[in-house]
Image: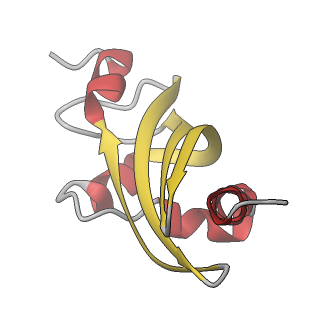
Amino acid sequence: METMEHKNAETVIEFIEDTENWSALEKTDQFFVPQFVEAFTDRRFAVDEIMAQGEKVIAKIFMTALHSGHFAGNAATGKTVTVTQFREFRVVDGKITEHRGWFDTATLLPQIQAQ
């Protein structure tokens, strides 16, 4: 028998793996997101780790993208980068009712040679 936590984790994994939802994964409340979306193209998302407790599901996601525009004082490098993103989901009755995310710029900036 599957637990609620297992079902909720599966719901979130399916959401992340569905390319139609990737635009939602690009959005966070971080002030630099519009610049980020312009600077990093060909974005792809993959689940690295997932943890569920009750209705809450936390996902560590790797986003790979091409650094094709200016970001944080750094000109485009043309390099493919991997950025860690953390997202918190709330799943009620098998549906995601809310989610929020944070990009870990500490994993990004060294890859584009930020000073």
Q: Name the residue rendered at 38%, 31% in the picture.
A: 76
Q: Pick the residue in front: 88 or 109.
A: 88
Residue 82, image x, y percentages: 51, 28
The spot of residue 25 in percent (x, y) is 50, 61
Compare residues 52 and 39 and report the one nearer the observer. 52
Query: Which residue is depicted at the point 49% across and 69% down?
Result: 55
Q: Residue at x 50, y 64 (%)?
A: 54
Q: Quadrant of the N terminus?
A: bottom right
Which is more toward the observer, 3 or 68?
A: 3
Q: State how the image is colored.
A: secondary structure
Left or right for 58, reference 47:
left
- Pick the residue in front: 6 or 68: 6
- The quarter holding residue 23 reads bottom right
Number of numbered discs overlaid on the protein picture? 0
Residue 4 in the image: above or below residue 95 = above
Q: Position of residue 38 (x, y in %)?
A: 40, 55
Is 77 placed left or right of 19 in the picture?
left
Quarter of the image for the C terminus: give it: top left
Q: Which residue is outermost to the front?
A: 1
Residue extending furthest toward the right? 1
| Residue at image coords 52%, 23% | 79
> Where in the figure is residue 99, as x and y percent of width and height?
42, 70
Residue 11 in the figure: left or right of residue 24: right
Say if 93 sits above or below 38 in the image: below
